[in-house]
Amino acid sequence: MNSERLQYLKLNKNIFLAFLVSMTVSALGANYFADQIELLNSTITLMIDHSVYYAVFGTLFYLDNKKKYILENGKINRLLLKSDLLKIVLSFGSSEIIYSIVRWGVQYELLILNYDAYMASVISHILAAIVFFIVINLGVNFTKLFKNKKQ
């Protein structure tokens, strides 16, 4: 398997695992705040979701890629790191905006329809994650995050 495909697999694995953890924690948070109005429940749950997701994803992404940015002399390749961080921010930026709108909106609507808070959280999380996976992979492909510079 070539390096580019392996990088895409690692990225998607990290996103998937981070989504699983954040879905679980945010569903617990939604249930805890179930007595709050729908607007507040959806907003708090989204904040919990983002906090947990970025902590887990950041840790996993770092563990998978830390060797990529270390030069032979042990110093950090700041140019490559800066370039990749810009590509990650560009890819995640639009994906996160779309994710947040879908996640919050679906959860809010499900709460209005009297779904249990944890179920509304899980359903909205899954739907938004599907949209996120599509958009993030298109973004990563567009920014050529994993393209080999020698090709």
Image: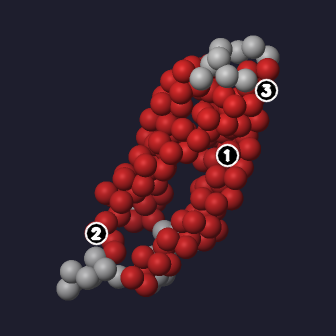
- Name above or below for residue 10 compared with residue 129: below
Q: Which residue is depicted at the point 56% across and 71% down?
A: 87
Q: Which residue is depicted at the point 33% across and 71% down?
A: 68
- Name above or below for residue 6 compared with residue 107: below
Q: Which residue is mark 1?
A: 99
Image disc number at residue 109: 3
Residue density around tag 1, few if under 14, some if 14–19, many if 20 or more, within 10 Å: many
Determine whether, in the image, residue 36 is placed left or right of residue 13: right
- Residue 89: x, y in percent? 57, 66
Determine whether, in the image, residue 13 is placed left or right of residue 109: left
Q: Earlier in the sequence, mark 3 or mark 2?
A: 2
Q: Which residue is mark 2?
A: 67
Q: Which residue is depicted at the point 74% across and 31% down?
A: 39
Q: Are discs 1 and 3 less than 8 Å apart at CB? A: no
Determine whether, in the image, residue 85 is placed left or right of residue 126: left
Q: Nearer the viewer, residue 10 or 114?
A: 114
- Name above or below for residue 94 compared with residue 16: below
Say whether residue 79 is visible.
yes
Give the structural element (helix, strand or loop) at label 2: helix
For residue 32, what is the image quadrant? top right
- Residue 66: x, y in percent? 31, 66
The residue under label 2 is which amino acid type? Lys
Q: Are discs 3 and 2 less than 8 Å apart at CB? A: no
